[in-house]
Amino acid sequence: MISVSDIRSRDIRFHYDLTTAFYRLLWGQHIHHGLWEPEHGQVTGDSPLAAQIHLINTLATKASISAGQRVLDVGCGMGGSSIHLARERNCEVTGITLSPVQKAWATTSAAFSGVRRRTRFRRADAERIEFPAGQFDVVWSVECTEHLFDKPAFFRKAATWLKPGGRMAICAWLAGEKSDTPDGLQQVRQVCENFLCPSLGSEVDYVDWMTAGGLEMIEVADWTDQVLATWEICERRVRRTGMRWLAKLVDRNTRNFLDHFETILNAYRSRAMGYGCFVARKP
Ligand SMILES: C[S@@+](CC[C@H](N)C(=O)[O-])C[C@H]1O[C@@H](n2cnc3c(N)ncnc32)[C@H](O)[C@@H]1O
């Protein structure tokens, strides 16, 4: 795991409070990568939204999510996954986010999407919240665990929230296989600092944390090549619009975020970073 020291939880909350509207304009309701399938060695030309939905559907299928199941969406953002799982798979979803702005946004979107009764959003810190044991069929988290400070403790606790037979489904930015070179380490540190991640775990770390919680791995997949078009598209969109200028009026973290899309793209290309999908089952 690669860690940086000067990130605070309130900076993360403040970042999402401030930038939710930016994310919505730039990338839509889902604040996560798209997943593009390779075709003849090239990724296909699906739209970013189609690729994001493909990521969610692929993860949901690997985690065998089906009608009536209770899902906890950890780091639910604007409710993209929660609303999709409630609407398309008839699940009962609880979403938690650090950001009160996102909580309000997700609640309103769920109402407009006709799934108000099947979703519930709370402003809560995943590292502090408690749920009774065996509450959920699925603990789902797409691109939130990067922001957690004590990742092993979170996975130990989250495993207790699952019913026997329940699944944990995670997508996460990773410290990649080349993160131990001086250049690689510097790239990962830059990503952590500018995208407010206290640390990035490796693929092996995630497997260790999930199995230490008593879970059995079902799937470990490296999706790096299939997601990196995300940043090429975001970088083009930021260049073509006045978003960088708008961000100058907001705050330093938002500016840093928009200025470092190339950093993350280079880190993926050099394999200093990776992108992983993990699904595990509670016996
Ligand atoms: C990159 S966004 C992903 C949002 C959502 N999963 C999606 O895919 O659209 C990261 C999310 O993690 C949430 N988050 C970060 N740290 C958290 C924590 N300690 N507890 C709860 N949510 C957290 C943020 O508020 C934000 O909603």
Image (spheres, grey):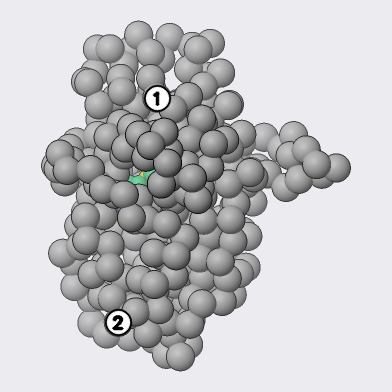
Label 2 belongs to which residue? 160
Residue behind label 2 places its C-beta within 8 angstroms of ligand 1: no
Query: What amino acid does circle 1 point to?
Result: His
SS assignment at label 2: helix
SS assignment at label 1: loop
Label 1 belongs to which residue? 260
What's the CA distance linking mark 2 and mark 1?
37 Å
Residue 10 appears in the rendering: yes
Is residue 171 shown above or below 94?
Answer: above
Q: Residue 134: image x %, image y %?
A: 33, 85
Query: What amino acid does circle 2 point to?
Result: Thr
Instruction: Work out whether residue 57 or residue 199 is closer to the camera in this orientation and state it.
Output: 199
Instruction: Work out whether residue 182 or residue 70 is closer to the camera in this orientation and state it.
Output: 182
Residue 158 image-quadrant placement: bottom left
Q: Residue 185: image x %, image y %?
A: 37, 40
Residue at figure coordinates x 59%, y 43% from the top left: 227
| Front of the two marks 2 and 1 | 1
Nearer-N-terminus badge (2/1): 2
Quadrant of the frame with the N terminus? bottom left
Residue behind label 1 places its C-beta within 8 angstroms of ligand 1: no
Q: Residue 179: image x %, image y %?
A: 43, 45
